[in-house]
Image (tube, grey):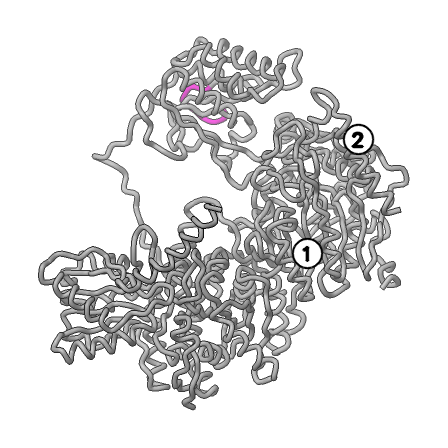
Amino acid sequence: MSRRLLTGNGAAAWGARLSDADYVPAFPITPQTEIIETIGGWIGRGEWDARMVTLESEHSMVAAAGAAAATGVRVFTATSSQGLLHAMEMVYTVAGWRAPFVMVNVSRGVSAPITLGSDHTDVMAARDSGFLQIHCSTCQEVVDSVLLAYRVGEDARVRLPVLVNLDGFHLSFTREPVEVPDIEAARGFLPAFDPGELRFLASKPVSQAVAVLGGGPYSYFRYETHLAAQNAVAVYDEAASDFEARFGRSHPAVEAYRSEDADVVFYMIGSFATKAKDAVDRLRDAGQAVGLVRPRLLRPYPVESIRALLAGKRGVAVIDQNLSLGKGGVLHAELASALYGCPDAPRTLASFVGGLGGREIAAEEFYEMARVTREAAESGRTPEPRLLYTEDELRELRKLQGIAVAERHDTGAE
Amino acid sequence: MKTASRILGSAFFREGFEVQDAPRYGAERRGAPIFAYVRAAREPIHERGVITRPDLVVVADDSLVSVAAAGVLVGASARTVMLICSNDDAAVWRERLGLDGPVFTLACEPAPDDEVRFLGAASAGAASRFTGVIGRESLEHAIREELQDLRPEAVERNVGEGLTAFDEMEAHAGCLSEGTIRSAEAYEDPNWVELPFEGVEISAPDIHGAATSVQVRTGLWRTMRPVIDYDRCNRCSWICTTFCPDSAIHADADRTPRIDYDNCKGCLVCVAVCPPHAIAAVPEQVAVAADSEEAST
Amino acid sequence: MSERASETAFRRMKDLPSTHLLGAGTATCAGCGGLQAIHEIYDVLGEKTIFVNAAGCMTLLSIYPFTPFRGSWLYTAMACAPAGAQGVRDALDILKDKGRIPAEEDLRVVVLTGDGAAYGMGLSSTSAAIDRDLDFLYICYDNEGYGNTGQQSSAGTPHAARTSTHRGALGYPGFKKDLFSIWAANRPAYVATVTGAEPVDLARKVEKAAAMRGPRLLIALSPCPTGWSYEPKDSVEIGRLAVETGVWPLKEYVDGRVVHTRRPRKRVPVEEYLRLQGRFAHLFEPERNDALLDEIQARVDAYWEAAD
């Protein structure tokens, strides 16, 4: 094992290499490009015996990835934002094929307006597809999660593709010290892919992904895929335990940070959760019992762990770096559905939407979210959902608007 | 039958009824059996989907009635009225099917000047009369409305067929009875099960087998049957077998072609391409009758 | 290449197989010209084949639990069957190269799409597969419209044909895309036009394509009783007339050259072909549209003048 400085993208590439992936269908998109360029370099220099193919779109990329996995090889691919959206038809389709492979998504806000900044709205669009989802908060987690993802997705009890999510820029382009496992140790953790009966061989004809007629067969196949995804909660726990035993790093399905005795808890995913940890420490310094609960596994949704970790809390500040237009934060809605009817569920779930399109979340904002949530829990009145947006930001926006609108008027006057 | 269902639906609607009519689409294509449904009520209809307990069953292709897989009799009970377009009479069908309920037939023979009888309009006409609530004018109006894209002569013929059938069934006006609503007090348990997780070898939408499609009896689609006159067949062995779109003709080792009637859809491409004209097209009912005669002698 | 190509197993009609690989009992319409071409092609390719299918009429060849194939099948989606073929081909090559499967477990990879996918939504992924020199065979069953959804106009629809989206007196105002030339412009190993009504020509071309490597593409004109509105029994007659009138030139692109494999000596007037099909009935009734008929004939004549 060696400790070195790696970007999140570099860590993702290492995850693929240590997993002995056979095949990498690729299409470039900012901020994912470094992943496929790194892999292309390794393959080109003969450092890694894999095959890379560059497709003409993410839709085709996911089709090739799923088809290769359905033929019986280990596949790695990566995308981001508009690319994930462009691929979405095939994202849903290949999950239904029960073709296991790993796709890294480097989270970035979706169009319109088009932007390069990071948020999680892109990956939320894949939420109901049948892909499992693992969300990372550090570059270390990225390399480890790719290995875990293959182990879980290829398990006979699961057989599903997995998305490993990392935040654009905040992780993708940020170097951090990362322990890179030895290839032999990685192979010990992750055996070769056994496709079982689901593969294409001349001696064993199979028609895969055929049409069905009627709701009976359709319901069966869809629900079996759902049951397989749910199996992944237990399979993930097993894999994470084994991983910890081998590598000494713990990656539970739901991370809890100083939450045991907390009365108010931040609930969020992704890299800004490390900022939340800092905020927790400062709030503790100020005498407040605040903690953090962070699901790494979002699909399957580890309902039991989440309920147990939040039982008896007074208030939860749910921080969504995504926006379901016309509804609000997705994590908030999901958490509410998981906790509804639980006798010891937190009294207050406060909804905060922040960090959209690469916007920062400042320490003071974490402190303020904790205050609002605590007061709401005391008063019993759940606050309206809050967009994290400051007076300064609005003032700056007004300046831009002044230019944009003035130009339009000037042109019209001529 | 889709046309018949739309005519019936429009006629009910014109009489002031609330109506649902719908074809049931499947994978089946041209030539495949098709099902269509009509519901009518004085009150708004909240029921949806397939009719599971019909008051009236109309069958355009009588070769389907006796075939369990076609599902013609599913849900029918003693009070269900059957209308079968057939040249066999009602008594024959009652006996053949062991039915206690009312059975009527409409002869398939066309009027002297016509090539074919327009069974859609005719069966809608008969069905309208059975309801007892659809008038002659509403039926005529509905036929004209639904067939307005046809040529004027064809519309007139259809109107004629529909009204003739309506008049033929005068004695049976109002023979339909309305089904009862399913009670919420004493109902049949839907018997839900817990779906178990199953391994991907069986729980993925995959077929681990070869040419299982031959089990699908597409022979049911056929209304005309190609019959080989082996005295005229010159054993070329490749023309009918190659051109049959469905691979439903194979040649024996001695080059004698054999038609797989379980799967032949009756497209009659073989009839059209056979150089010595050794394949004849025989109406399916005639062929079935000939078969049963042969079997009994 | 030309030496080997002449060594065909299909010199005349009696050389065609009289037993067939493709199972009966599929859901295609009675008289389907597309299925006719596919079963003729399958007989030549053999069962060590995987069909990678795009959304279209043939999606419903395999409906759980029934498949007509003796080999394998993968249904993808409308736009990306060639990309699915890329994944399968690459995976099989990886498995062979790494010694995980013996060579005899390999499969021939065949893309199967209609004209809706081939001429439109799937053209980008096809073009890219040719760029990448993918070793695959592409079969387009071209019934000149989105047949599976009721024959709406596609980029394969011929000028003036009436479709379910173009019901007016002039039919479809656009022109059938020259997919053969578009494909050939990418310089793949092989491109050919075929039709099920000319089975010997078809068998020779499939035989030739099967012996090559790289991108090989076939467009099969597929008379469609449902979408073209004619009696199912006439499928072969209409396919033959498409060739004899010159509407559907039988040709191939190989080694950078286009060769016509059939040159009708005296072309039958196009009218004979159009008249049999309900989709062109508005050219004859209620009155003859001579202008449009002449235009269609002129286009066919111009094609052959350029070809000769």
Q: What's the residue type where badge 1 is placed?
A: Tyr
Q: Position of residue C129 (x, y in %)?
A: 65, 62
Q: To which quarter of the image does residue C90 belong?
A: bottom right
Residue at the front extreme?
A: A414
Taking A234 as reference, is C207 left or right? right
Label 1 marks a residue whose chain is C
Residue A101 placement, left or right of B275? left
Residue at point 34% right, 32% down?
A: B47
Could you tell whether B285 is left or right of B164 in the image? right
Q: Is residue B31 above or below residue C45?
A: above
Q: Which residues are magenta?
A: B95-103
Q: Quadrant of residue C234?
A: top right
Q: Tell which circle, 1 or 2, labels the residue nearer the N-terminal end.
A: 1
Q: Residue furthest bottom?
A: A2
Where does label 2 land, which residue?
C294
Judge depth for marks 1 and 2 and give the one in front: 2
The label number, if any, that marks residue C138 in the structure image: 1
Place of residue A258 in the rendered image (x, y in percent of width and height, measured from the top left): 20, 77
Q: Callout 1: helix, strand or loop?
A: strand
> Does any portion of residue A203 appear in the rendered image?
no
- Residue for point 29% across, 28% down: B181
Image x and y of residue A266, in percent: 22, 69
Against A156, residue B293 (above or below) is above
